[in-house]
Amino acid sequence: MKIGGEPAIADSTCIVVCELCPWPISAAQIQYPLGLPSRFQKVIKLKKVLFVCMGNICRSPAGEGVLQSILARENLQDEIFVDSAGTIGYHAGKPADARMRQAAERRGYNLTSRARQVNRDDCETFHLIVAMDRDNLRYCHQLAPDHKGKMKLLSEFLVGDWPEEVPDPYYGGDAGFEKVLDMIEAACPRIILELQNGGASGDA
């Protein structure tokens, strides 16, 4: 994800917006022994959310791309950092499945992430981890049992008659990819509210 023209720093919890700079910069990168100058207008606590599926080539990159687009549209991209990962590393370094990218593009979303495997550091540094199904959630629980409080199913952010799990579309047809996008789009507003209200847990 890029913020203001420069890459966001995933391990930073705070960014500073300067009226003289074209992009936000990490507070950790600036050393002022007497404090920040007055030209730094505001400090924003950067919340971080991680979408997790199995291979990180269908469901979770869709979650990442859709939420990034919504945040940009609502001018919230400086407040929330979005990433995605998989429970297996088989597809590491690969782009999202072409069918998922095409379905997303039809709705105006651009999926640019590369697959990677989730790790314990993710569980410690992200404020909210959104798993697509119970197997993904169970894996994250086993990876970092002391951070279960920040791990939730995507369906926990849905209201109405939705499946409990986001179905894996990999072995199906086009309708499966559309279903994934439907569920993610419906969940994103409540995911944003969760992060704005402090995230799923204060232990990040």
Image: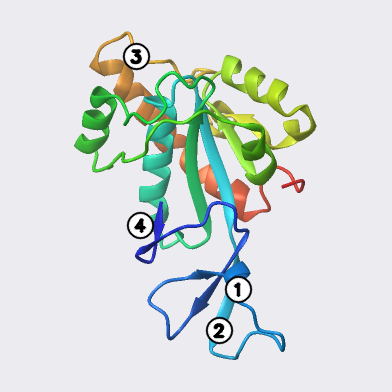
Asked whether disc 2 touches disc 4, contact meaning CB atoms under 8 Å apart, the reply is: no
Disc 2 to disc 1, C-alpha distance = 8 Å
Residue beneath disc 2:
40
Q: Quadrant of residue 172?
A: top left
Give the image location of residue 39, x and y in percent: 54, 89
Give the image location of residue 203, x and y in percent: 77, 46
Q: Nearer the viewer, residue 35 or 33?
A: 33
Badge 1 marks a residue whose secondary structure is strand
| Above or below for 143 versus 110 | above
Q: Which mark is first along the chain, 4 or 2?
A: 2
Q: Which mark is first along the chain, 4 or 1?
A: 1
Q: Nearer the viewer, residue 173 or 159?
A: 173
Disc 2 to disc 4, C-alpha distance = 24 Å
Amino acid, disc 2: Phe
Give the image location of residue 81, x and y in percent: 51, 52
Residue beneath disc 3:
170
Residue beneath disc 4:
73
Asked whether disc 2 touches disc 1, contact meaning CB atoms under 8 Å apart, the reply is: yes
Q: Residue at x 60, y 89 (%)?
A: 37
| Above or below for 168 versus 14 | above
